[in-house]
Structure formats: structure tokens, C-alpha cells
């Protein structure tokens, strides 16, 4: 009787092992690829949604810069009025970390952060920077930098638009008076984008450049 029991136990263990092996085989060659495909589809959906929200975010910042670039403060190059207008821009947009008005020669005429305005000695030369060169090229274009990081690790993007004389007052087709530039933080928009999805615990969302 004992031998029979051991034989039955051995057969039972063998059947269990076969069932586990079959389950593993089915998981590897059927269920796992389907699950992998669904995970990839989910990641693509998250990426597209995040890209759309970030693009909307950037477009809104650019539109706001263009709107302010057409105010008398920048068109008349009145330093006091320019500094006051920069303060208005900050009050309207809490994502901005720095805003500058750069003159036709590439020198900052006024720059401020949420905390303070730069002194004359602190104003920088921007003639060779992309944020000045691209908007002041013929028929000036908007500029968007790649994402970069502050010393505190905060993701930032540099945006700039040409300050252009209104068409009705324009004497020259390329009459660009300077550049309005801003450093915008992407921190909040990235947090809002990640919170829009239930990613579960111990999962991460990464922001990578075109090089990966």
C-alpha cells in the first residue's frame, strides 16, 4: 500500500509539473506577446497625450510672448515701461523663470526673474545665442530650445519671439526691433500629464530627447 501511495504521489507530481510547464509555454508563446503589445500600445497612448499637452503648453507661452511683444513698452524701447511689462508677464504666468528683452544689437536691455530685475552690470550679451539669432533672421521666426535643466534639476525650455513693428507702421519688411525671450519650467505640465494616467505604484515616466 505504501508503494502504491508513493507511485500515485509521483504520478501526481509529474502531472502538476507537466501542467506548470504547459502553462509557462502558453504564457511565453501566446499570452506574454499579447500583454507586451498592450503595454506598448498603452505607452504610445501616454506619450501622444503627453506630447499633445506639452505642445499646447508651449504654444500658449509663445502666443503670450507675441501678444506682449506688440505693446508700446517694447516698440518704443522705454526701459521703465519694459521693466513694468516684464513684471506683468510674470504675474500672468507662474511657469516662467526668467524673461528678457534683447535689443537689435543682441544685448539684453532688461531681464528679470520672479524675484528681481537685473542691474545694468548683470545684463548679458546674447548676439550669438540661438534665442536671438533665429528670431532676428529674415522674416523672424519663433524659437524653441531643446529641453535643458536648471542647477536644481528643473526641466526648462527657452522660448523667444521677434519684436516686430506692426505692419501698418512698418517702413521695412524686416523691421525687427529686438527679441522677447523667456525661460519656462516644464515641471508642472509634466506632473499634470503623468497624473492623467493611472501608472500604478513604482512606475516612472521619462522625458527623453530625440537621441533617446
Image (cartoon, rainbow, N blue to C red):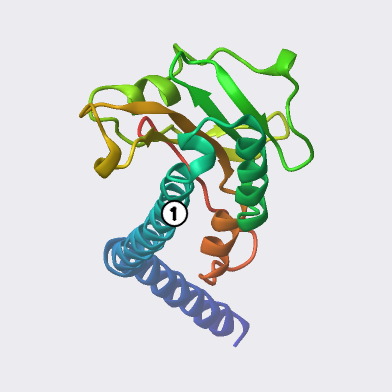
Query: For the point 46% across and 56% down, which residue is it?
Result: 57
In the figure, residue 161 lies in which quadrant?
top left
Tell me the SS state at disc 1.
helix
In the figure, residue 192 lies in which quadrant?
bottom right
Percent of width and height locating residue 139: 23, 30
Query: For the point 60% across and 49% down, which residue is it?
Result: 89
Percent of width and height locating residue 4: 54, 84
Percent of width and height locating residue 17: 45, 69
Q: With respect to residue 64, does 152 lie above or below?
A: above
Quadrant where the C terminus is found in the figure? top left
Query: For the point 79% across and 40% down, which residue is it?
Result: 115
Quadrant where the N terminus is found in the figure? bottom right
Is residue 70 something one can see in this rendering? yes
Q: Residue furthest bottom?
A: 1
Q: With respect to residue 106, does 212 lie above or below?
A: below
Q: Residue furthest left?
A: 173
Q: Residue furthest right?
A: 115
Residue at numbered disc 1 = 54
In the figure, residue 25 lies in which quadrant?
bottom left
User: Which residue is at the front of the view, 209 or 86?
Assistant: 86
Percent of width and height locating residue 199: 54, 66
Q: With respect to residue 84, does 55 lie above or below?
A: below
User: Which residue is at the front of the view, 130 or 9?
Assistant: 130
Judge left or right: residue 205 versus residue 84. left
Is residue 157 something one can see in this rendering? no
User: Which residue is at the front of the view, 108 or 202?
Assistant: 108
- Label 1 packing within 10 angstroms: few (<14), some (14-19), many (20+): some
Q: With respect to residue 172, does 45 lie above or below?
A: below
Amino acid at each position: 500500500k505504501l508503494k502504491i501511495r508513493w507511485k500515485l504521489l509521483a504520478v501526481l507530481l509529474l502531472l502538476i509539473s507537466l501542467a506548470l510547464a504547459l502553462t509557462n509555454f502558453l504564457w511565453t508563446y501566446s499570452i506574454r506577446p499579447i500583454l507586451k503589445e498592450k503595454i506598448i500600445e498603452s505607452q504610445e497612448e501616454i506619450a501622444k497625450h503627453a506630447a499633445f499637452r506639452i505642445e499646447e503648453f508651449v504654444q500658449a507661452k509663445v502666443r503670450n510672448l507675441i501678444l506682449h511683444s506688440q505693446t508700446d513698452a517694447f516698440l518704443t524701447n522705454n526701459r521703465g515701461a519694459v521693466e513694468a511689462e516684464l513684471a506683468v508677464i510674470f504675474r500672468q504666468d507662474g511657469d516662467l523663470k526668467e524673461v528678457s528683452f534683447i535689443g537689435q544689437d543682441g544685448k539684453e536691455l532688461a531681464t528679470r526673474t520672479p524675484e528681481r530685475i537685473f542691474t545694468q552690470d548683470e545684463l548679458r550679451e546674447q548676439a550669438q545665442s540661438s534665442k536671438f539669432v533665429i528670431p532676428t533672421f529674415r522674416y523672424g521666426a519663433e524659437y524653441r530650445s531643446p529641453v535643458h535643466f536648471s542647477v536644481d534639476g528643473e526641466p526648462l525650455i527657452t522660448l523667444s519671439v521677434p519684436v516686430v513693428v506692426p505692419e501698418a507702421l512698418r517702413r521695412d519688411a524686416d523691421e525687427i526691433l529686438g527679441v522677447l525671450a523667456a525661460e519656462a519650467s516644464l515641471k508642472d505640465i509634466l506632473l499634470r500629464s503623468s497624473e492623467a494616467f493611472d501608472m500604478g505604484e513604482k512606475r516612472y515616466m521619462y522625458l527623453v530627447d530625440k537621441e533617446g
